[in-house]
Image (cartoon, rainbow, N blue to C red):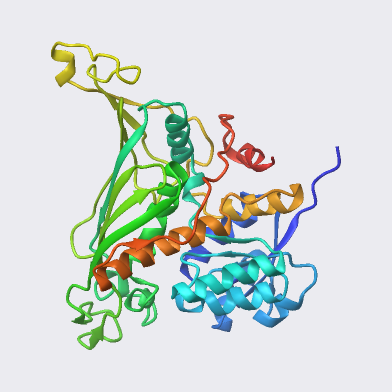
Amino acid sequence: MPQMKKVKTAIIGCGTICNRIYAPNLMEKFHIIDLVACADRIPERAQALAEKYSLKVMTNEEIYQDPEIEIVVNLTCPESHYEVSKAAILAGKNVYCEKMMAVTLEEGKELYALAKEKGVQYTIAPDTFLGGSWQTARKALDDGLIGTPVAMVCCYSSNYQFDGEMSDIDPDHFMFVLHPGGGIPYDFGGYYLHNIINLLGSVKRVGGFCKTMYPDRIYRNPRHPNYKEPVHVETPTSIAGALEFENGVHGTLMITSDSVPRFVFQIMGTQGILVLNDPNFFGGSVKVIRSGAAPIEPFQEAPSGMSAFFPTECTLPITHPFREDSRGVGIADMAYALRNGRRPRAHMDLGFHAFEVMHGIWRSGDTGKIYELTSHCERPKPLRSLGLSGTAEEFTLDD
């Protein structure tokens, strides 16, 4: 059987997330990817990455015009996502873009339509929904382990303070959280929404509230070059959304950066509750809570006795691969999709729908009205449960 041709890939944006996990994974974990080039607005960053992995330093335009490069990985800051993705799509490149796809909904709509017009694949991070825990949770739901889903609750809080300890590297570090398209709702909201949609499907309409706690602040870290200087926050730091799904499930999504670290992610069904991990990660526990009071079939009389008041909790075995930090698996999946003529799992319908949900919550809070979603997204195709690990994990993408 002939070996599948690797997909030549280039990275634009050689910052923290690129160096920490994307570049190492693309070079070492996913063999379908042939990472050949990189570019950055700061030439020294591109040069350092190129020297580490024997890549070619190129300009953005050189990457767009190189006929051998098939995938452009857009790891720039959110304010640059639209410009870089648009230029790559216009050049006929397939694009994988870090969350979220753009700053404004209008920009997102334009990119979505342009990718369709050009006939290229346009996929959006995050790809944690392809992780072992989330694919295990998907299988548990699809197998009816908690019956029919009826409700969902997601809550994430953090002390994600750009003016504090997280801002001690350089003046630009985490500065995207100040501006529209950044902030914790957009930075972390994508993790929750991609996983929510993977599990429960499309959202029909949303209502919401948004606020910016303490919009005028000062840099509090003595190590920061702008220590004690004022800084203005232009994006919400806290959101609360009510979601109605097309399948009738009701849910709540709350995200804030003005508290202490904590998360809750649960899906309630007619026969139990699925208790999930933080969707920022690929792995973690998946638990099921079932009660003796839960009828096995609809309208069947529930058993009586004390079992009705003492639910049983169990931890499910993780049945799927990609249990460690596998950022870039969405890029590898797109590469296999290109070679096998199928749709990528992190397809643009998913990315745009999640993007519109977040904007819908913001617009609902701004207008005081329910926001009706205009987009629709089919749940991504689940991964195969092969129990593979290490380099063998990649073969679950080859379908």
* Nearest to the observer: residue 247 or residue 211: 247
* Nearest to the observer: residue 341 or residue 25: 341
Q: Is residue 275 above or below residue 4?
A: above
Q: Is residue 19 above or below residue 350?
A: below
Residue 358 picture location, percent across and down: 37, 63
Using residue 335 as the reference point, say whether residue 18 is left or right of it: left
Using residue 213 as the reference point, say whether residue 192 is left or right of it: right
Residue 114 picture location, percent across and down: 63, 72
Looking at the image, how many numbered discs can be counted on the residues?
Answer: 0
* Residue sitting at x 34%, y 47%: 278
Q: On the rendered image, what quadrant is the N terminus found in?
A: top right
One can see residue 192 in this view: yes
Asked where in the image residue 63 lies, by quadrant, the reply is bottom right
Q: Residue furthest bottom?
A: 229
* Residue sitting at x 14%, y 11%: 305
Using residue 308 as the reference point, say whether residue 393 is left or right of it: right
Asked where in the image residue 277 lies, by quadrant, the reply is top left
One can see residue 237 in this view: no
Q: Is residue 225 above or below residue 276?
A: below
* Residue sitting at x 53%, y 71%: 109
Residue 99 picture location, percent across and down: 47, 64
